[in-house]
Image (cartoon, helix red, strand yellow):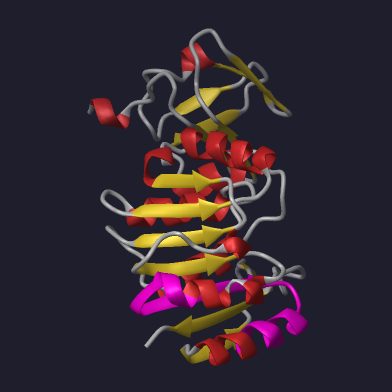
């Protein structure tokens, strides 16, 4: 049962219906203040997940073990625009990334996609991520350490436009505005059957990447866009929510024959 109880240093999600809060790391003696009141760390540590804690204002929250998605998108420091879960998940699936995969990524940014890639390549795979800005690389390093995923990532403070050092990798994932400049390097780095994935903000960039991918010798080149719409579900009133996650970016995929 010990693994089902909150330990010091754990990340904990406080679920209160419409309100949820993430504590990055519970520390003895700590106090956590929310709109609904203050929760003491000593009232959380040792409790079982699923139990309730009560704020000093009498508001009840359930203790929930956070998922990777909770940690990455709620607890990570953010210095750059990040890839949405809907796009990240499709990239991972389309590239066939799993335990043991070797993946090259550029640029690292705040490390959100890096963390998701690292989670799936565990325990024997590696993510090699290129980032030209040292301040972003440091933010990503701290985020990955928070998620316990830094051991599966090699952060390279280099310009991927100058070339990719790795060979026979399973996937190359590019989140950069001028990804077409790296398509040729990606072809050389990938194994036969490996996948190139690019996240791009505009159709002009999509055109350049697709043209360059075909020129480089890639096959099965495709461009897609994913939209995510939530529903309000209530008896007699179920309908789409008025707001949705619409355009976030375009995805281009290509395979090396």
Residue at the extreme left of the image, as rendered: 1
Question: Where's residue 254, x and y in %?
Answer: 49, 84
The residue lying at 37 percent from left, 39 percent from top is: 151
* Residue at 61% in and 50% down: 131
In this rendering, is residue 241 above or below 10? below
**Is 74 a magenta residue?**
no
**In the displayed image of the protein, which residue is found farthest to the top?**
29
The answer to whether any part of residue 34 appears in the image is yes
The answer to whether residue 238 of the structure is visible from this angle is no
- Where the C terminus falls, by quadrant? bottom left
Residue at (57%, 91%) from the top-left corner? 215
Please say if 87 is above or below 126: below
Q: Which span of residues is magenta-colored? A: 187-210
Given residues 120 and 4, the one toward you in this image is 120
> Total marks drawn?
0
The percent coordinates of residue 78 (x first, y second) are 68, 43
């Amino acid at each position: 049962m010990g693994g089902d109880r909150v330990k010091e240093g754990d990340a904990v999600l406080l679920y209160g219906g419409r309100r949820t809060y993430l504590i990055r790391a519970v520390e003895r003696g700590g106090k956590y203040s929310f709109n609904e009141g203050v929760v003491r760390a000593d009232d959380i540590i040792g409790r079982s997940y699923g139990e309730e804690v009560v704020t000093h204002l009498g508001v009840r929250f359930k203790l929930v073990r956070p998922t990777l998605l909770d940690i990455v998108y709620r607890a990570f420091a953010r210095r750059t625009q990040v890839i949405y879960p809907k796009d990240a998940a499709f990239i991972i699936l389309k590239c066939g990334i799993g335990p043991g995969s070797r993946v090259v990524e550029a640029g690292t940014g705040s490390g959100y996609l890096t963390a998701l890639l690292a989670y799936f390549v565990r325990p024997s795979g590696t993510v090699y991520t290129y980032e030209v800005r040292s301040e972003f690389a440091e933010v990503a390093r701290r985020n990955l350490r928070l998620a316990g995923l830094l051991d599966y990532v090699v952060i390279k403070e280099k310009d991927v436009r100058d070339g990719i050092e790795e060979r026979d990798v399973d996937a190359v994932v590019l989140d950069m505005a001028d990804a077409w400049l790296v398509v040729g390097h990606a072809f050389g780095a990938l194994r036969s059957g490996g996948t190139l994935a690019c996240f791009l903000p505009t159709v002009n960039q999509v055109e350049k990447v697709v043209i360059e991918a075909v020129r480089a010798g890639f096959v099965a080149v495709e461009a897609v866009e994913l939209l995510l719409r939530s529903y309000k579900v209530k008896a007699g009133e179920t309908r789409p929510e008025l707001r949705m996650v619409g355009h976030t970016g375009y995805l281009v995929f290509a395979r090396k024959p």
